[in-house]
Image: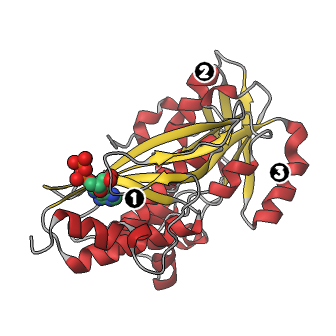
Amino acid sequence: MALTEFGLIRRYFDRAASPGQATHASGVALGIGDDCALLRVAPGMELAVSTDMLVEGRHFSPGADARNLGHKSLAVNLSDLAAMGAAPRWATLALSLPEANPQWLEDFSEGLFALAGLHGLSLVGGDTTRGPLTISITVLGELPAGLALYRAGARVGDDLWVSGELGGASLGLAHARGEVKLERGDAAAALKRLHRPEPRVELGERLRGIATSAIDVSDGLAGDLMHILERSGTGALIEYARLPRPSAFHRLAVAEVALEARCVLAGGDDYELAFTAPQAAREELQALSKELGLALTRIGAMQPPGTEPQLLVLDAAGRPMPSQQGFDHFARFNA
Ligand code: ADP
Ligand code: MG
């Protein structure tokens, strides 16, 4: 490597050390450069910690755009903080690189720091090694003690909500793989959903004290919802027609209705929030949706435990969808 390991870190990742950058990121007593970073968690706050790893060939294709990768590898982590109701504060980055390619590093760090800047997050450390391209980020966030949004808090009778739209990212993936042919504008929108997900950070924070449970939709609505059902000990009913989806699906051939159901119910990578809330919170959530300029859609309700199937999806005519035979029908291996 023409760049030494330390030169690389200083040049591309130590923003506090580069001229013109703020040297005093908030809550950082010591950033990159020593054996540990030192952070100050405000009194009365809890620290939320989450790690996600992206591996070339499994989570993204070889040759994937570096700026998109920088964005997405942080976005998937921020989405976990959002699902917990935590405000992003700090992150560490573990990078395994096959080579020190300056253009790649420039683009990757630009994508990463642009998103970090949007959310006031500082990169405080990491590790760099040579090896197959792998990106692992740990994010640390703060939230007032006791107010985290658990998967376990849903109650029978709660409404079930979802933010934004579902199925766009997996439609983009189907398009990229040549499994479906989209019009140019639809393709651009779907690929944007796939490559540049927008973590619902502000929504997550605002749901504290309103939502009874929450999860981010990373592996597909049906599968992710099962985690809430299992942890909360409830069932759920979803009305398929209510699920918000990109208008591109309306323009698909009739033969592709199965693709639509697969993307909307089981498609991964949308990074929306699915959450439950008491019926009494409907007006408050509608007002929040307006304020954030983000669709919040009521898609169903939590059912008593012991109902079979645990997750029932009804079509527009009120008939159980075939998926009720078991959602492994839609399963997606994402380990
Ligand atoms: P150590 O050997 O003590 O783990 P390193 O030599 O790996 O330290 O790293 C030196 C400093 O650079 C540490 O503060 C570490 O957190 C930081 N660092 C290493 N790699 C990265 C990276 N990819 N992004 C941000 N900081 C990094
Ligand atoms: Mg190290």
Left or right of 275? Residue 12 is left
Q: Does residue 219 lie above or below 14 as drawn?
A: above
The answer to whether the beta carbon of the residue marked 2 is less than 8 Å from any atom of ligand 1 is no
Residue drawn at (52%, 53%), measured in percent from left and top? Answer: 28
Left or right of 57? Residue 12 is right
**Among numbered discs 2 and 3, the one appearing first in the sequence:** 3
Crowding near pointer 1: few (<14 within 10 Å), some, many (20+)? many
Task: Residue type at mark 1: give it.
Answer: Ser
User: Ligand 1: which quarter?
Assistant: bottom left
Residue 69 horizontal/vertical position (percent): 35, 66
Q: CA distance from mark 2 to mark 3?
A: 29 Å
Task: Residue type at mark 3: give it.
Answer: Leu
Task: Residue type at mark 2: give it.
Answer: Glu
Secondary structure beneath dot 1 equals helix
Using the image as rendered, state which of residue 3 and residue 116 is in the foreground. 3
- Examine the image and state in which quarter residue 59 appears: bottom left
Residue drawn at (24%, 80%), measured in percent from left and top? Answer: 103
Secondary structure beneath dot 3 equals helix
Query: Which residue, as the protein is rendered here, is positioned at the far bottom?
Result: 184
Q: How many marks?
A: 3
Using the image as rendered, state which of residue 299 and residue 258 is in the foreground. 299
Q: Nearer the viewer, mark 2 or mark 1?
A: 1
Residue 312 horizontal/vertical position (percent): 62, 32
Q: CA distance from mark 2 to mark 1?
A: 37 Å
**Among numbered discs 2 and 1, the one appearing first in the sequence:** 1
Q: Write down the residue under mark 3.
A: 285
Q: Write down the residue under mark 1.
A: 73
